[in-house]
Image (cartoon, grey):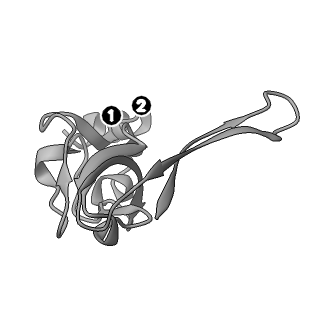
Amino acid sequence: MGIVKEIQFHPVKDNILHIDFLHVFEDKPVVIQIPVRLEGLAAGVRAGGKLSLDIRKLKVKALPANLPEELVVNVENLELGKSIQVGDLAFDNLEILNAKNAVVCRVQLTRAARGAAAKAQ
């Protein structure tokens, strides 16, 4: 069994120039980067903040059968000025290898939100 490790595209035409495959065995864990998808409307965004995704892919180690297409992170409870770090995440049957204190996503304070907070005081 094999999975795509890397694809190189032509810089102008977007044609595929090269593909690297990773040969995997069902009983041996693999290390691979998996895309992160944010789900939900963050509480901080409703309060006027801006949601930013700082890490688009996470490095994980798992058996090939347990590798998802994407890692879904629910951000509904993410407040203004708060962030979700790698250490806050847990997924079944896989280990995240990125640094635990690395920020995956955050809700940043915008100028409009700062102005509204200043007027409220």
| Amino acid type shown at disc 1 | Arg
Q: Is residue 33 left or right of residue 16?
A: left
Residue 111's mark?
Answer: 2
Quadrant in the picture for the C terminus = top left
The residue that appears at 17% across and 68% down in the rendered structure is 93
Q: Looking at the image, which is closer to me, 1 or 16?
A: 1
Q: Looking at the image, which is closer to me, 20 or 41?
A: 20
Give the image location of residue 6, x and y in percent. 55, 41
Rendered image quadrant of residue 111: top left
Q: Is residue 109 above or below residue 2?
A: above
The number of discs equals 2
Residue at image mark 1? 114
- Tag 2: Cα neighbours inside 10 Å, few (<14), some, or many (≥20)? few
Give the image location of residue 28, x and y in percent. 23, 58
Give the image location of residue 36, x and y in percent. 39, 53
Give the image location of residue 57, x and y in percent. 40, 44
The residue that appears at 33% across and 61% down in the rendered structure is 25
- Tag 1: Cα neighbours inside 10 Å, few (<14), some, or many (≥20)? few
SS state under label 2: helix
Residue 30's mark?
Answer: none
SS state under label 1: helix
